[in-house]
Image (tube, rainbow, N blue to C red):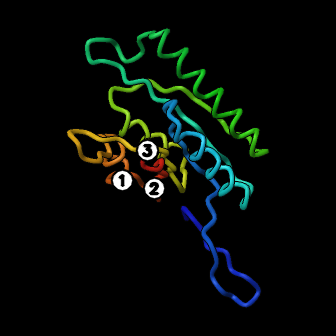
Amino acid sequence: MMWRKNENKRGEVGALDFDRVLVPVSGSKADREAIKIACSLAKKSKGKVYAIYVIRVKRSLPLDAGIDSEMQYGEEVLEQAEQMADEEDYEVETEVLQAREVGPAIVDEAVERDVNLILIGMDYKKRFGEFSLGDVVPYVLKDAPCRVLLCREAIP
């Protein structure tokens, strides 16, 4: 079972427990809120929070190409995620991944880690004058094997 419901002594159903939460981070302002919410949700069931940073590798390069600048940036972003979790008095496991596309990498990681929630923080972005989810979020919403929670920043 991917998630379970809390029942109180009278058998009433309460909030859902998420004991394995995946948080893809990108270095945006929205990461802070996503990590904070993930830690809060996981605390209730003493679960795990996994923060990942995905490096998009160009097709002209081998998938395992050493992209030092991107790897360094990813490590810095994950270090910030660890600090944010420390502020919430919680621990996160972190990992940098390399993939051709970010969306499939997030979904594959969710499957591999058997998470029951993917929590994505996103900035408010406009493309051609209209609000845009980009290409990663729609992919994850469509293909994730678990619940997905979006945490969008306020309109600037």
The residue depicted at 47 percent of the width and 16 percent of the height is: 70
Q: In the displayed structure, does residue 110 sit left or right of residue 80? A: left
The tag earlier along the polypeptide, 1 or 3, is 1
| Residue neighbourhood size for the residue with mark 3, other residues' Cα within 10 Å, grouped as few (<14), some (14–19), many (≥20) | few
According to the picture, the residue beneath numbered tag 2 turns out to be: 148
According to the picture, the residue beneath numbered tag 3 turns out to be: 156
Q: Quadrant of the N terminus?
A: bottom right
- Percent of width and height locating residue 50: 60, 41
Q: Which mark is residue 61?
A: none
The three-letter code of the residue at mark 1 reads: Leu
The three-letter code of the residue at mark 2 reads: Val
Marks 1 & 2, CB-CB < 8 Å contact: yes
Task: Classify mark 3: helix, strand or loop.
Answer: loop
Q: Quadrant of the C terminus?
A: top left
Distance in Å between CA atoms under marks 1 and 2: 6 Å
- Percent of width and height locating residue 146: 46, 57
Residue at the far bottom in the pictured view = 10
The tag earlier along the polypeptide, 1 or 2, is 1
Marks 1 & 3, CB-CB < 8 Å contact: no
In the depicted view, which residue is nearer to us: 125 or 83? 125
- Percent of width and height locating residue 111: 47, 47
Seen in the picture, residue 57 relative to 31 is either above or below; the reply is above
Q: Which mark is residue 141?
A: 1
Residue at the far right in the pictured view = 89
The three-letter code of the residue at mark 3 reads: Pro
The residue depicted at 68 percent of the width and 88 percent of the height is: 11
Task: Classify mark 2: helix, strand or loop.
Answer: strand
